[in-house]
Image: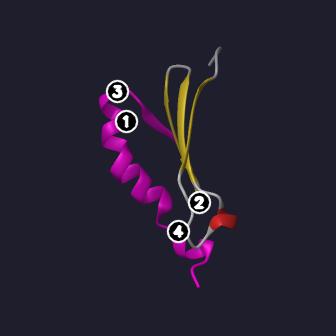
């Protein structure tokens, strides 16, 4: 059985795969946790995450939004 501990590669792989694409659009990584990586540009945020309760076959959630005033 796959556990969330076995998905410890998620933040590094997400940053390696999505990072160059995000950088082309001016986004940089601002936070990295076990199940979520967030990129930002000015007040815009894009987060890639999965839910541990969905392991062993989690989907990837992509949250796109803005945080005015940052």
Of the numbered discs in the image, which one, if any, rests on residue 3? none
* Local SS, label 4: loop
Label 3 to label 2: alpha-carbon separation: 24 Å
Mark 2, residue position: 34
Residue 59 appears at what percent x and percent y?
55, 57
Which residue sits furthest bottom? 1
Of the numbered discs in the image, which one, if any, rests on residue 22? 1
Question: Which badge, 1 or 2, is on the more N-terminal residue?
Answer: 1
Whether residues under marks 3 and 1 lie with C-beta atoms below 8 angstroms apart, the answer is: yes
Label 1 to label 4: alpha-carbon separation: 21 Å
30 is higher (above) or lower (below) than 32: above
Find the magenta span and give its range: 1-30
Is residue 27 rendered to the left or right of residue 50?
Answer: left
* Local SS, label 3: loop
Q: Residues within 10 Å of mark 1 (few under 14, many from 20)?
A: some
70 is higher (above) or lower (below) than 48: above
Q: Main secondary structure of the magenta part?
A: helix
Q: Residue at x 55, y 69 (%)?
A: 57
Mark 4, residue position: 8
């Amino acid at each position: 059985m796959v556990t969330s501990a076995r998905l410890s590669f998620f933040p590094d792989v997400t940053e390696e795969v999505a990072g160059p694409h995000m950088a082309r659009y001016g986004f940089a990584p601002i936070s990295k946790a076990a199940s979520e990586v967030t990129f930002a540009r000015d007040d815009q945020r894009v987060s890639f995450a999965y839910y541990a309760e969905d392991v062993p076959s989690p989907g990837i959630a992509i949250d796109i939004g803005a945080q005015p005033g940052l």
